[in-house]
Image: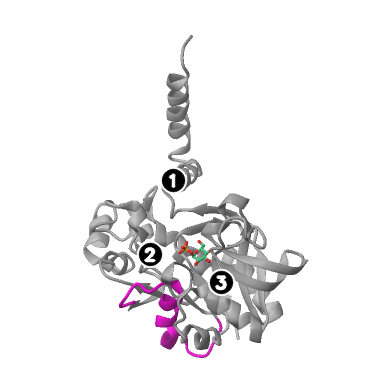
């Protein structure tokens, strides 16, 4: 069975971006001129996903409105002959997106468990909104290919620096062939100095439906939350769960500085913005160089 369904959890409170996220979901914060979540949805669609379920919480209506068709706006753009903008607006309404609310913020594992009825008894994908990955072959598509070869759960990983390992789920790798790892242990946010490797889970997962029986237990893990990594660790004891070191540039848009860097990088990729932005940055650099 191929991977056709994906879960995007979007119920987090976005406290790191307050006050911007007081009345607006963090998933709607724009990078250049598109909300962050649109990059995630695009990766899913480009990877062959047909149905997406977004797990939302309080104050997340703007996400639903964004992926809805916007009749008045479209009419207006059509009348004004702004066809390029019209296409962009329509594109965001072109996927089958469903919504479910996570009633209490009990953690990532709980958010995924909330979507179990939508998934049913088939393997599925999970994409986390804080990680944007750019690559010719989308990150999720790479994981789907691995799934098609192994018919096992597969978790996207990348190397992070030693002093960051406490911010991630970390794998204890057994063997490695062509970027594919068998895993001894998955551990969520190990304290610094105790991480079994520097291979970190980066927000992309293919999971078999058996994961739900472990999420069902509602075990509390790191940070007092129900952790997806803990359920993956249990799953790995009953069926193989691989880790795949995917190819691609990863942007962590859950952190302020990285969010700004992402905005600059993605703006530099745009024909309309590249030159003026480079010029502006050059001016800044000159002004900031102390004169002797
Ligand atoms: C979550 C996962 C963690 C993973 C990380 C990737 O943590 O629990 O295993 O490494 O996403 O971004 P969070 O960043 O939500 O605390």
Locate residue 183, reporting x and y percent. 69, 72
Q: Residue at x 71, y 67 (%)?
A: 173
Q: Which residue is mark 1?
A: 263
Q: Is residue 147 visible?
A: yes
Quarter of image, res 107: bottom left
Relative placement, left or right, of 79 versus 141 is: left
Local SS, label 2:
loop
Q: Quadrant of the N terminus?
A: bottom right
Mark 3 residue CB less than 8 A from any atom of ligand 1: no
Alpha carbon of mark 3 to alpha carbon of mark 1: how far? 25 Å
Question: Which of marks 1 and 3 precedes in the sequence?
Answer: 3
Locate residue 85, reporting x and y percent. 34, 54
Q: Which residue is mark 2?
A: 92
Of tags 3 and 1, the one toward the viewer is: 3
Q: Residue at x 54, y 83 (%)?
A: 211
Question: Mark 1: few, some, or many residues within 10 Å (few <14, many ≥20)?
Answer: some
């Amino acid at each position: 069975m191929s991977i056709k369904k994906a879960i995007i959890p979007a119920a987090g409170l976005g406290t790191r971006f307050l006050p911007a996220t007081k009345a607006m979901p963090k998933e709607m914060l724009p990078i250049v001129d598109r909300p962050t979540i649109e990059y995630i949805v695009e990766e899913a669609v480009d990877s062959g996903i047909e149905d997406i379920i977004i797990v939302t919480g309080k104050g997340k209506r703007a996400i639903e409105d964004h992926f809805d068709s916007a009749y008045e706006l479209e009419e207006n753009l059509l009348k004004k002959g702004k066809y390029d903008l019209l296409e962009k607006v329509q594109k965001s309404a072109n996927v089958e997106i469903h919504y479910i609310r996570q009633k209490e913020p009990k953690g990532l594992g709980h958010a995924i468990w909330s979507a179990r009825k939508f998934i049913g008894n088939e393997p599925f994908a999970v994409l986390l909104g804080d990680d944007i990955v750019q690559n010719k072959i989308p990150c999720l598509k790479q994981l789907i290919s691995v799934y098609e070869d192994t018919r096992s759960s597969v978790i996207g990983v990348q190397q992070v620096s030693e002093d960051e390992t406490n911010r991630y789920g970390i794998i204890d790798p057994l063997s490695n062939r062509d970027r594919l790892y068998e895993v001894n242990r998955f551990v969520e946010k190990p304290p610094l100095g105790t991480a079994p490797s520097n291979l970190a889970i980066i927000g992309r997962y293919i999971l078999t439906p058996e994961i739900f029986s472990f999420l069902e237990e509602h075990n509390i893990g790191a940070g007092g939350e129900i952790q997806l990594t803990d359920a993956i660790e249990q799953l790995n004891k009953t069926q193989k769960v691989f880790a795949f070191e995917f190819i691609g540039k990863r942007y962590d848009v859950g952190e302020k500085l990285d969010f700004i860097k992402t905005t600059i990088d993605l703006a530099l990729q745009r024909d309309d913005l590249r030159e003026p932005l480079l010029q502006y940055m050059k001016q800044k650099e000159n002004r900031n160089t102390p004169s002797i």
